[in-house]
Amino acid sequence: MSTLSVLATFADPANGMHVAAESGSGFTIDFDASESTERAGAAPTEVVLGALAGCTAMDVASILRKKRQVPLRYQIAVSGERSAEHPRVFTSIVVEHRVTGEIDPEAVRRSVELSATRYCPVSAMLSHGVRIEHRYRLVRSEQDDEPVSALVVVTGPG
């Protein structure tokens, strides 16, 4: 078993909504949930989506490399719908892996599936309470007019 830690410090408890969280490994993440246009960081819920994107991206890239499938470009687009009522939890999330390059579609599909169902701890945690669609979109070349797109797996409750 391993333990992770974070120490969060409110920048100005009397005003604003800026919190700086320092990880046990020494990195800082700025959060800001203020309504102002001059925010000092992302909203915590945006960071949750970012953590999911980062976690699954690292898995998929690693698996693709092991399969000797190296994309020219790789992006992960994550969007989440939230309930209207507080605490405004995510009700559904869509993760789309956008891959460009001469990559085997089955390699992309299997890599996404393994990340979603076996390796990504962020996906596993969120799947306990949120329906998550994991999909990919593969464009083999910049001139490719017909990308390959597919739903890989849906995790989470019904």
Image (tube, rainbow, N blue to C red):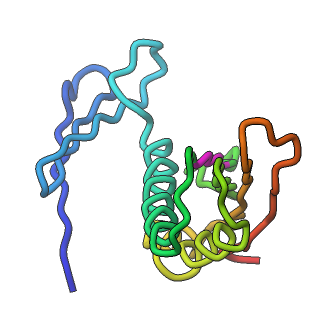
Q: Where residue 30 sits in the image (x, y, percent)? A: 29, 34
Which quadrant is home to the N terminus? Answer: bottom left
Q: Residue at the location (29% across, 29% down)?
A: 18
Reply above or below: 5 against 74. below
Residue farthest to the bottom? 1
Which quadrant is home to the C terminus? Answer: bottom right
Q: Residue at the location (69% across, 48% down)?
A: 81
> 107 or 125: nearer the eye?
107
105 lies left or right of 88: right
117 lies left or right of 153: left
Q: Where residue 41 sits in the image (x, y, percent)? A: 36, 29
Reply above or below: 60 against 13. below
Q: How many marks?
A: 0
Q: Residue at the location (46% across, 77% down)?
A: 119
Q: Residue at the location (66% across, 55% down)?
A: 102
> 114 or 108: nearer the eye?
108
Q: Where residue 64 sits in the image (x, y, percent)? A: 52, 68
141 lies left or right of 46: right
Q: Where residue 124 sits in the image (x, y, percent)? A: 51, 75
> 40 or 113: nearer the eye?
113
Q: The magenta stretch spans which residues?
A: 76-80
User: Residue 77 magenta-drawn?
Assistant: yes
Reply above or below: 144 against 137. above
User: Residue 82 magenta-drawn?
Assistant: no
Q: Main secondary structure of the magenta part?
A: strand
149 lies left or right of 141: right
